[in-house]
Amino acid sequence: MWKAVASNALTLFIVVLLFAGGLLIWAKQKYAEPGPLETAICLRVEPGSTMVGVSRDLGDQEAVRHPLIFRLGARYAEKDDDLKAGSFLLPAHASMEEIVDLVTRVGRSTCGTDVNFRIGIASAELQVRTFDPATGRYEEVLAFDPGTGEVPAEYAGLMAEPDLRYRVTLAEGVTSWQVVDELKQADFLDGDIAAVPAEGSLAPDSYEVTPGEAREALLAEMAARQTALLDRLWETRAEGLPLASKEEALVLASIVEKETGVPGERRRVASVFVNRLERGIRLQTDPTVIYGLTMGKAPLGRGIRQSELARRTPYNTYQIDGLPPTPIANPGRASIEAVLNPETTEYLYFVADGTGGHAFARSLDEHNRNVARWRAIEAGRGGN
């Protein structure tokens, strides 16, 4: 009799064990398989939330089929205590495993409202965008220049939304004075700026910031990125360049940055200046003259006068040999790369061609013909 009881108990234990094993395999499969979401959504995780509450929200939004498996999977992965507050983009058909990873690993919101303070060559713009999970794109809500003092009424309401992401973006070719002047208008930053950073020392890039971050700290990050970038690119420079230092490369890169906005011709423009430096020909570039007049504090707003071209200043490359003493703007990566690895050409001149780019020439005669064509284009536009 006891043998029969023991045999039956063992059989039952094996059945239970097999059932538990099968249940575990099934649960792991459900945890990793694509979820029921047909379109992406933004999941809001409030501060102080628990994985239990999040699993219920996910169930209510039909993002997961089995909230209990979601919680158990997070606990098994030892992530149930790593929940982050924020708004997170859940892609269509995200698995429970992927969702757990998103809400515990990212550490910052991946959807919601984005505030981007863009510092451009001529002006700044504060742009507010909201992420549309259905299209996967940010849609502009409003944009304005904070320097004008005219702030849209809806701006204050948008600033009250949770999980705003803040960003400061520098355009290529902005001057350090412009950056400092515009950052004073960024009301989500804090602190004074003791001095304008050296020209060329700030990296044009996009910087994620936190509300209340010190302006000085942001400038330090910009300078650190530019230094690191220049150090890396200097190591990849072509041989035989007429540039004695990284600092000279930065000066020339800033000139290229101000001379052309066409990505495909940066290396060709750089070759003109490199050829001139190698042959001892003055650079004769207008942007350096303009910088000598304004010191980067404002656009000139008019043409250069003949008297200004004839005046000898440290930045008048019609009057001085070689490079000016400092950069004339903050060049971006592409312009730095261009001067460190320019095209191999015999060009010594270039002039606008009427299409946004430039016509290049090897000789003065060829250049004069290009100039005549450009002047004819200008005259035709003036007559329209």
Image: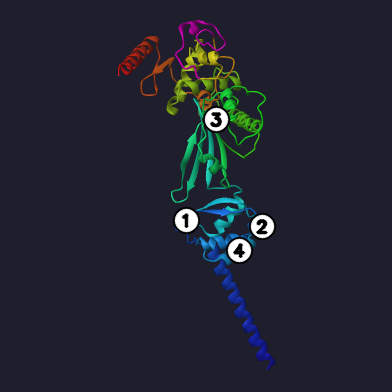
Q: Position of residue 347 (x, y in %)?
A: 43, 16
What type of secondary structure mainly makes up the magenta span?
loop
- Please state the extent of the stretch shown in magenta in the rendering: 299-320
Of 288 and 27, the residue lying toward us: 288
Query: Do callouts 1 and 3 mark residues in contact (Cβ within 8 Å)?
Result: no
Q: Residue at x 64, y 62 (%)?
A: 75
The mark that comes first in sequence, 1 or 3, is: 1
Query: Do callouts 4 and 2 mark residues in contact (Cβ within 8 Å)?
Result: no
Callout 2: 10 Å neighbours few (<14), some, many (20+)?
A: few
* Label 2: element kind: loop
**CA gap, disc 3 to disc 2?**
38 Å
Q: Which residue is mark 2?
A: 81
**CA gap, disc 1 to disc 3?**
34 Å
Q: Which mark is residue 325?
A: none
Q: Is 311 included in the stretch rendered in magenta? A: yes
Of 269 and 327, the residue lying toward us: 327
Q: Decide: is 88 above or below 74.
A: above
Q: Amino acid at mark 1?
A: Ala
Q: Residue at x 38, y 13 (%)?
A: 367
The mark that comes first in sequence, 4 or 1, is: 4
* Label 3: element kind: loop
Q: Decide: is 162 above or below 204.
A: below
The mark that comes first in sequence, 4 or 2, is: 4
Which quadrant of the figure contains the C terminus? Answer: top left
The mark that comes first in sequence, 3 or 4, is: 4
Q: Which residue is mark 4?
A: 71
Q: How many marks?
A: 4
Q: Position of residue 268 (x, y in %)?
A: 44, 22
Q: Residue at x 55, y 51 (%)?
A: 88
**CA gap, disc 1 to disc 2?**
25 Å
The mark that comes first in sequence, 3 or 2, is: 2
Q: Which mark is residue 204?
A: 3
